[in-house]
Amino acid sequence: MKKLPIILTSIGVMLVCSYFAGVWYFQDHFLPTQTIQGVNVGLTTATEAITLIDTAIAEQEMKIEVVDNTVGLDLGTLGVTIDSTALAEQTLAGQQTWLWPFAFVQVEATQTQEYQINQEVMKQALFNAGITNPEGKVAASNATIEKTETNFALTTEVSGTVLNPDKTYELVAKAVAQGEDSVSVVDARELPSVQAEQLQPVIDTANKMSANDQILTVREETITIPAKQIFAWVNIVDNETVVIDEAAISSYVQAFVNDYTVMATARTLDTTTMQQSGGIEGSTIAVGETTKALVAAIKSEKKQTTPATLSQISSPTHIQGVGETYVQISIQDQHLWYYQNGKLVLESAVITGDETQGWGTITGVYSIQAKERDAVLEGYSYGWDYSVPVKYWMPIYSDGTGIHDASWHSTFGGTIYRGGGSHGCVNLPPAIAEQLFNSVSVGTPVVIYQ
């Protein structure tokens, strides 16, 4: 019994010595259950732990699912690291070494740190592993439209197997940062920008436009334009716009003009009574308007009967009793002709006197009374005196009526003279006025009629 106290004292001394030995030991060793970044570093020094951590991270495999297979790369190859030294030293310094006996039964909280990723190293590793290297892969291609001999056909898009390097890097880097051990990069594929579903409506429209014959009527006659011809006029531009070749249609219509033109016959002007007699109006296909009508018919996607637009051909007026050289002016046609020795050498649209103001140009047989360059025409209108300079002045009557250039007008002919006409003179485009001025002589007859 006397030895029991001695034994208990010895045990106590041994426990105290063991405890303090443990406190001293765990000053530079990790507690038994300590983990760092998922690696068990218990009972190791900081230097040993650093080696274990770096090795474990470098050898950790990331499985990368690509389009047609899975590639495994370790994190070291992918340029993934952590500051293991700082993390190990920080963890060791924060240990509660005086509680080390409890560490054998209590699991220490694991210490972690965000991964550090070398972007260039990771991108190069992904390329070297064939993941982002386009060689041997199928490139993405857009859906396209092809015009065959009979219709417009669709070639569907190809998604391909080429991965976008930047998108692939982002997906892998995100998986690493989240601690994942696998990632799919299929979504990093370079996809076509034009899909078949985008083009199908365009193809349908083009095929419908060119599926039917079109009928063109000229007076009582019918011309059938076959669908094959219409197909040649329909095209698709930039895979998105259906266009119709109006120039080709215009040429097609133009080919019928000579066959379907009815020529006018000449009228005779009695210079005594200024009355016209005889003659019939002619007509021809108005190419521009007929072309527009055919284009509208084709765009309707249905078989249509389109009447050709006809333009009238006015009967020429044959003037007797004034010789072979004369100036002829029609107020109704707003046109001037100059005949020299029986041949037409000059013609032009004109603007005559404004009939709405009571300034209509006089009719009858007159003559060029004088030729004056750089003249100034003076008169009175709307309560104001006017003074208008002209370059080519050819008076034909004593009341001041004459023929001259009118540079203030940009267009001539039509119905301009009703509301926008002159005070009675015959206005010409400057270039025509100069030609007429240089061609006529004083005394040349001028015949003006309605």
Image (cartoon, rainbow, N blue to C red):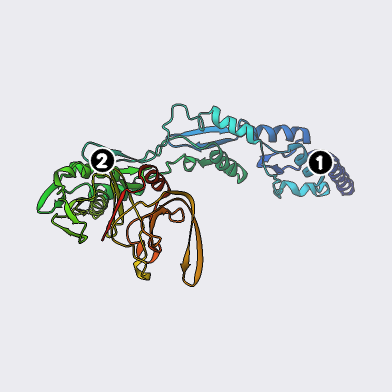
Q: Residues within 10 Å of mark 1 (few under 14, many from 20)?
A: many
Mark carried by residue 161:
none
Residue 304 in sight from this viewpoint: no
Whole-percent x and y of residue 160?
41, 36
Quarter occupied by residue 60 = top right
Q: For this view, does 78 lie left or right of residue 432?
A: right
Q: Residue at x 87, y 43 (%)?
A: 20
Q: Is residue 438 above or below residue 72?
A: below
Quadrant housing residue 127: top right
Q: Decide which of 111, 124 is in the foreground and name it.
A: 124
**Residue 168 placement, left or right of 426:** right
In primary-sequence order, the first of circles 2 and 1 is 1
Residue 361 drawn above or below residue 122: below
Q: Position of residue 300 (x, y in %)?
A: 24, 55
Looking at the picture, which amino acid does disc 2 mark?
A: Asn
Q: Which mark is residue 26?
A: 1
Q: Is residue 53 left or right of 237 when viewed as pictured? A: right
What's the mark number on residue 341?
Answer: 2
**Residue situated furthest bottom in the rendering:** 383
SS for dot 2:
loop
